[in-house]
Image (cartoon, rainbow, N blue to C red):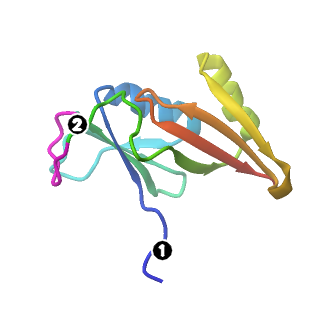
Amino acid sequence: MIVQRLDHVNIITDRLAETARFYAELLDLKERDGPPPMLPSQVRWMHDSSGQAILHLNSTDCPRVFERGVAPGAETGAIHHVALRCDEFEVVKARLDARGADYRVNDVPSIGLKQIFTADPNNVLLELNFFAG
């Protein structure tokens, strides 16, 4: 097989610190610097508990190898949402409630799945998946 797994998602934002804080506080992702020569003021990488970079957050003025137009805060275009497998459904739901966040819960009992749909500070739609067991 050529594809082993999804590596990461890149979000370009004009709210770098706010976006990093959102993912750290909601999903316990750890904020780290990107590798040099990337500047911490332009790049924040969000890692899971195993050290895997899940999200690359870039400021709008961050240099890019493949430049193309972006509109921070706009809906995510052809990509409808980003799905993350999570645990601790009630903890995440309580964190969203504490933020006064808009979200929707979906239950798919046939496969033991609860979902939370919410948007990050850049209007990127997140599908947070919580499987039983």
Which residue is labeled 1 in the image?
4
In the drawing, what numbered circle is on residue 42? 2
Total labels: the figure holds 2
Label 2 neighbourhood size at 10 Å, few (<14), some (14-19), many (20+)?
Answer: many
Residue 23 lies in the magenta-colored region: no
Residue 66 lies in the magenta-colored region: yes
The magenta-colored residue range is 60-68
Which of the 4 image quarters holds residue 89?
top right
In the drawing, what numbered circle is on residue 46? none
Q: For the point 47% across and 56% down, which residue is it?
A: 51
Q: Is residue 128 above or below residue 15?
A: below
Secondary-structure class at tag 1: loop
What amino acid is found at the position of numbered circle 2 in the picture? Gln
Q: Percent x, y for residue 14?
A: 28, 27
Q: Percent x, y for residue 11?
A: 35, 41
Residue most extreme to the front = 78
- Distance CA(mark 2)–CA(mark 1): 29 Å
Q: For the point 44% across and 26% down, which residue is it?
A: 121
Q: Magenta span: helix, strand or loop, mainly?
A: loop
Q: Nearer the viewer, residue 129 or 125?
A: 125
Q: Nearer the viewer, residue 77 or 55?
A: 77
